[in-house]
Amino acid sequence: MSATASSYSITMRLHTLPDHGVVGQVATTLAKAGGIVTAIDVAESNHERLVVDVTCSAVDETHSQALVQVVDGLHGVEVHKVSDRTFLIHLGGKIEVASKVPLKTRDDLSLAYTPGVGRVSMAIAENPEDVRRLTIKGNSVAVVTDGSAVLGLGNIGPGAAMPVMEGKAALFKRFANIDAWPICLASQDVDEIVRAVEMIAPGFGGINLEDIAAPRCFEIEARLRESLDIPVFHDDQHGTAIVVLAALTNALRCVGKHLPDVRIVVAGGGAAGSAITSLLLAGGAVDVAVWDREGLLSRDDETLPEAKASLAARTNPNLRRGTLQDGLQGADVFIGVSGPGLLNPEWIKEMAPEAIVFALANPDPEVDPAEAAKHAAVVASGRSDYPNQINNVLAFPGVFRGLLDAKASHVTDEMLLRAAEAIAHVVTDEELHPSFIIPSVFHPDVAKRVAAAIAGRPLHKD
């Protein structure tokens, strides 16, 4: 692997001899050592020394330490301090609460708080449906986790999950102007989690379940959808499924195939794999097989645990059994939401012509995208340093924007299918290419189109 501008980024504060030629020597040394210099700033200059801030990217933490060592070994250079830029932006957290109304005078206080606020509270007590209109409930989402399946890091607990949930809240605000709060629960008991969310639900317009391990997440979502009158959306499941279906729609357009006609193998029967499979079937797929630790899941295998038996009952119509390689024989599509290095690039040769490979395990995919591209017609991954990044940010902001705007009480498969179609069609026929099957998360139309699709309303151009 090589460094990228978005990988491990550090800033070194250097004390050097008062010779500006040293700065060039530092940049050259870092480049030779595999680092990418993104900024050099002379913070202080006098007749005795220069103080220089050098920002560069490394492959990983070990590489960043090696870069520091090679710079520190240069004649006339002392590494005074090293800052990890990722940690710097997390200092003090990434989100805050800000007042939307002025609080500068006594009159302001009397309107926003007592005595004026009492009138508003009584109005809501008399007409409970006004709570969405007169409070933040109508634009708020709880991002709820138990810290049991955080990114690719596993069961690291609620405190360690907090930076991820903060980031999620920041994305809600950036892409859909939704106010979201991280709710990190100190329990991994289903009953306790369900009860905790039920108790906080009156203050929110929607619940976004996040990074909760399977199969626990399935029961939690089902019970909350049953008991609450606001939408409950497990992003690891349904957000991923929406974006995968959108990307697959366009990948199939590239190779001239159609969803009902292709054979699909999904690697991973957890939360994401189950939701992807369900949405593919709802969207018209016919032949979908799921592979997991037990091999290809088949309904005639009586040893499968309950969640996987349920998945097998809806998939693999030809009752294929065996390894992942066995399942890929003649398959048109591989979708991986499992773990790193599970797919041998040579196996792609055994798939159908014009094969499609989505290797979505993060941060390390099932197969190196560059190697997969040697044999597959279309390749996508979850990484930002390759084309066709499958990123949930394309879905969840717009999904919740649409749910909140429509004052929806639940989420349906029809909504999810419309959201996937909306994302897919942001990519025009002129733009569509095997290396461009999914729009950028920064495309201004994505969230608006998804929101309109979820709410079931036509999109009016500004």
Image (spheres, rainbow, N blue to C red):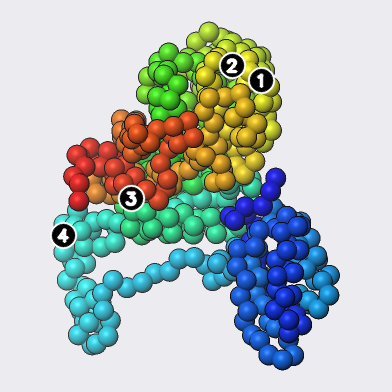
Q: Amino acid at mark 1?
A: Trp
Q: Is residue 68 above or below residue 127?
A: below
Report the residue that reaches farthest toward the front.
21
Label placed on residue 126: 4
Residue that label 3 marks = 444
Q: Position of residue 293 (x, y in %)?
A: 66, 25
Q: Residue at x 42, y 45 (%)?
A: 440
Q: Quadrant of residue 131?
A: bottom left
Q: Amino acid at mark 4?
A: Glu
Q: Residue at x 78, y 77 (%)?
A: 78
Q: Earlier in the sequence, mark 2 or mark 3?
A: 2
Q: Secondary structure at mark 3?
A: loop
Q: Quadrant of residue 66?
A: bottom right
Quadrant for the N terminus in the image: top right
Q: Secondary structure at mark 1?
A: helix
Q: Position of residue 313 (x, y in %)?
A: 50, 16
Q: Amino acid at mark 3?
A: Pro
* Badge 4 vs badge 2, beta-carbon distance below 8 Å: no
